[in-house]
């Protein structure tokens, strides 16, 4: 497993340093709000901004020094919204503010409900369901209706007036404008009829009050459902313990986790949660890392192994040294990645954004046409007015704005629980379209820990002498095969000789001078083909026998003569064959890319069930090989783990970094699989399909609701109260449908 890192402050793009600023936005009520704010922020010089309605976040990217936090906040304020910087402290403050707002809105709702309840008694009489006595015009006297409806309209409903004014001041219209227009028209008409003493005309105080009350109820339900979509982030935040045990003055004392610094020693007792990332100095135990990797089995740990914050110690006692604290822990990196993914915008959302930008003006126009048409056709001013009000209150841009981000929030949260970290939502959207998957061999299909299994020698050489010469050249390399050769030499007790002029040739081998008993000698080490290029042939029989056994071969030549052939084997992961089979059942063409000898590649391919493979692919050629695999129009994925895989990962449409990979591979990948298994790729594709399915369902529900609801209201087939209730519940239904993604589990 590799430490997951993410630069949140600055990054380098095309040679220019860019910064990222994330702001928590208050005051947004619908998709029109987020679309308008996004346009305002993108008008700032050199700023690329995205605004997410569901997370209530704005993410701004800009050249270093081109924007200040104050300037960004001022732009948000000009658009009619509030903004605060995000972070751990701000997150707690935002949560506290939301809770306070929730309690206030709940009180307002119950007050509105109590005031509206007597007005609801008027509806049976209005529809003729309750016969009135002769001369009686209303069940509830109109002056009482006026007294009850007024505080609901202007006190409880003040939030809608404030939102509408802020939106219009910013140069556009949002859902609040529709609510204010609809309810105000109904209220003002009813007030005029009441003051004029026209008992022959209906009043609609109950409609204006009930619409506001029902919409407020819908907002409360929507807010509670949206809060559940962030459950994954909240669960991750709760994992890290608040206190750590350290030795001080010969005693073990507890200190706040935030006081720990890199290099500090801390102790873990059985059952303790690890406070920060660290390295074990002494002790042995098994740690439960399920909360980070999704792997249910405990992982054995001993001196020299890494422990990660929030994982749970087993039965042993461990003494550890802190290596990553605060924002540098793997847990903090995971939280940043999840928040980054949840705050990004999927390409599928663009259509909804374009519609939201013109939605409210279009609805107002439809309402005006409805009013004019009904009045001209029927001559009934009252009926024309009430149908126009129904059009205004049935329309719901909120559902359009919440359809995509709520599904993404739940999907990426579920992915984080299963050890899948999505860097951007576009990758999640594209993952379901992958038809070809290129996989690296070492560390992806195999365990990535090769060991020397066989050494064959040339004339005048022994196993020890071949390993001694090879290890001398390989001792400064970080390559896994080099480490295996050095480890084998040390196991045999061979002292590593002095070297000079050592030169590594990427993907081919190493050459240099090694000091031997007879003096300095030129040594060449690498693939058999590389050694052959230097004029030294490897015995064909020996080469064929060892290659057929599936070994990775390292040929050694000294002073222009063949010295020996070292066979290195890397065990195939226990679940690689099952993962490949699972990927095939999902319609993927799996292709293995490796720099190994063809015979070695063939042996690994047979063991894992892969029918297509490319051997002898140099690191610099992997990116081109990835691009060449896909037919025109096909999407291709790449799974790898090492530094050599970074260019290939970047070349793929969607890239997956296996968790044991180098940090550069993690940074290059779109999706990081914390668990060391290719099964994670299949899980990620399944998650992508499940999430995109929910997004499509949500968009369908949002569109069909408005496509059917607005014409029905315009045709006079919906009472404004029913229309208001339907509008209030449309957003709730979309968010609730997204929450069904919580049922998704990996491996199904």
Image (cartoon, helix red, strand yellow):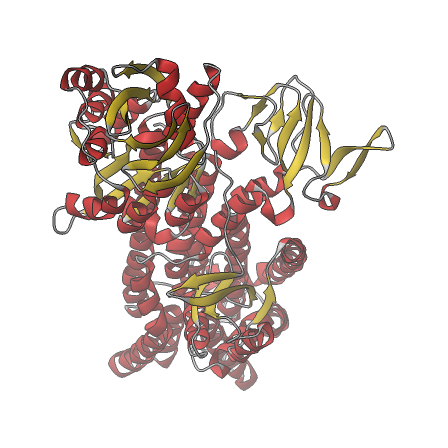
Q: Residue 527 location in percent, x, y?
A: 25, 31
Q: Residue 275 location in percent, x, y?
A: 67, 36
Residue 39, relative to residue 519: is it above or below? below
Residue 164, relative to residue 426: is it above or below? below
Residue 289, relative to residue 3: is it above or below? above
Q: Nearer the viewer, residue 397 or 289?
A: 289
- Number of dots carrying numbers: 0
Residue 458 relative to residue 544: left or right: right
Q: Nearer the viewer, residue 711 or 148?
A: 711
Residue 587, relative to residue 198: is it above or below? above
- Residue depicted at x 86% and y 28%: 250
Residue 561 relative to residue 146: left or right: left
Q: Does the rendering let one see residue 20?
A: yes
- Residue depicted at x 62% and y 32%: 279
Q: Does the rendering let one see residue 676?
A: no
Q: Residue 202 location in percent, x, y?
A: 46, 74
Q: Nearer the viewer, residue 287 or 433?
A: 287
Q: Quadrant of the C terminus?
A: top left
Q: Residue 37 location in percent, x, y?
A: 46, 72
- Residue depicted at x 37% and y 60%: 400
Q: Residue furthest right?
A: 249
Residue 636 relative to residue 347: left or right: left
- Residue depicted at x 24% and y 47%: 623
């Amino acid at each position: 497993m590799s430490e997951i890192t993410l630069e949140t402050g600055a990054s380098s793009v095309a040679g220019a340093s860019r910064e990222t600023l994330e702001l928590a936005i208050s005051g947004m009520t619908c998709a029109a709000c987020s679309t308008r704010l996004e346009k305002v922020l993108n008008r700032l010089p050199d700023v690329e901004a995205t605004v997410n309605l569901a997370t209530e976040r704005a993410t701004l990217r800009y050249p270093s020094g081109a924007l200040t936090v104050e300037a960004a906040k001022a732009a948000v304020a000009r658009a009619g919204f509030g903004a605060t910087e995000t972070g751990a402290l701000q997150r707690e403050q935002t949560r506290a503010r939301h809770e306070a707002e929730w309690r206030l809105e709940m009180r307002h709702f119950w007050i509105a409900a109590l005031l509206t309840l007597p007005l609801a008694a008027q509806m049976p009489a209005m529809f003729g369901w309750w016969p009135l006595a002769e001369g009686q015009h209303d069940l509830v006297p109109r002056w009482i209706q006026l007294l009850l409806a007024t505080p609901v309209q202007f006190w409880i409903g003040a939030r809608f007036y404030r939102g509408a004014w802020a939106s219009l001041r910013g140069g556009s219209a949002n859902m609040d404008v529709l609510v204010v227009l609809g309810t105000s028209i109904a209220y003002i008409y009813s007030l005029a009829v009441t003051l004029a003493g026209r008992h022959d005309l209906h009043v609609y105080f109950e409609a204006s009050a009930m619409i506001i009350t029902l919409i407020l109820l819908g907002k409360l339900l929507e807010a509670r459902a949206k809060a559940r979509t962030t459950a994954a982030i909240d669960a991750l935040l709760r994992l890290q313990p608040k206190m750590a045990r350290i030795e001080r003055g010969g005693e073990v004392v507890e200190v706040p986790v935030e006081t720990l610094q890199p290099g500090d020693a801390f102790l873990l007792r059985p059952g303790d949660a690890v406070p920060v990332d660290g390295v074990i100095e002494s002790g042995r135990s098994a740690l439960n890392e399920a909360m980070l990797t999704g792997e249910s089995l405990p992982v054995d740990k001993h001196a020299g192994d890494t422990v990660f914050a929030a994982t749970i110690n087993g039965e042993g006692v461990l003494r550890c040294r802190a290596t990553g604290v605060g924002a540098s822990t793997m847990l903090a990196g995971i939280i940043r990645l999840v928040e980054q993914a949840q705050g990004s915008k999927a390409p599928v959302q663009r259509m909804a954004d374009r519609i939201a930008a013109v939605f409210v003006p279009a609805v107002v126009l439809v309402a005006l046409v409805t009013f004019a048409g009904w009045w001209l056709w029927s001559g009934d001013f009252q009926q024309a007015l009430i149908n126009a009000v129904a059009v205004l209150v049935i329309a719901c841009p909120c559902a359009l704005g919440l359809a995509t981000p709520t599904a993404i929030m739940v999907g990426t949260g579920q992915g984080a629980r299963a050890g899948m970290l999505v860097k951007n939502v576009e990758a999640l959207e594209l993952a379901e379209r992958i038809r070809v998957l290129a996989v690296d061999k070492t560390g992806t299909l195999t365990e990535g820990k090769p060991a020397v299994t066989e050494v064959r020698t040339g004339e005048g050489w022994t196993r020890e002498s071949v390993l001694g010469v090879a290890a001398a050249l390989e001792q400064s390399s970080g390559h896994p095969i080099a480490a295996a050769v050095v480890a084998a030499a040390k196991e045999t007790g061979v002292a590593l000789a002095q070297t000079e002029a050592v030169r590594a040739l990427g993907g081919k081998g190493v050459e240099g001078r090694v000091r031997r008993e007879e003096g300095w000698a030129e040594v060449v080490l690498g693939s058999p083909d590389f050694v052959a290029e230097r004029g030294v042939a490897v015995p064909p029989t020996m080469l064929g026998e060892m290659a057929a056994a599936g070994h990775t071969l390292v040929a050694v030549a000294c002073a222009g003569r063949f010295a020996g052939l070292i066979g290195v084997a890397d065990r195939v992961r226990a679940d690689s064959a099952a993962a490949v089979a699972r990927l095939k059942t999902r319609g993927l063409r799996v292709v293995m890319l490796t720099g190994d000898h063809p015979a070695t590649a063939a042996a690994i391919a047979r063991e894992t069930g892969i029918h297509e493979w490319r051997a002898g692919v140099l690191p610099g050629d992997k990116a081109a090989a990835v691009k060449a695999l896909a037919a025109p129009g096909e999407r291709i994925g790449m799974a790898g783990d090492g530094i050599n895989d970074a260019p290939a990962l970047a070349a793929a449409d969607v890239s997956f970094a296996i968790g044991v990979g180098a940090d550069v591979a993690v940074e290059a990948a779109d999706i990081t699989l914390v668990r060391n298994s290719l099964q994670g790729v299949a899980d990620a594709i399944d998650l992508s399909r499940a999430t995109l399915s929910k997004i499509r369902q949500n968009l369908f529900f949002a569109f069909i609701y408005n496509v059917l609801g607005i014409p029905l209201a315009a045709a006079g087939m919906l009472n404004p109260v029913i229309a208001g209730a339907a509008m209030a519940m449309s957003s709730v239904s979309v968010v609730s449908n997204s929450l069904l993604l919580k049922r998704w589990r990996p491996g199904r």
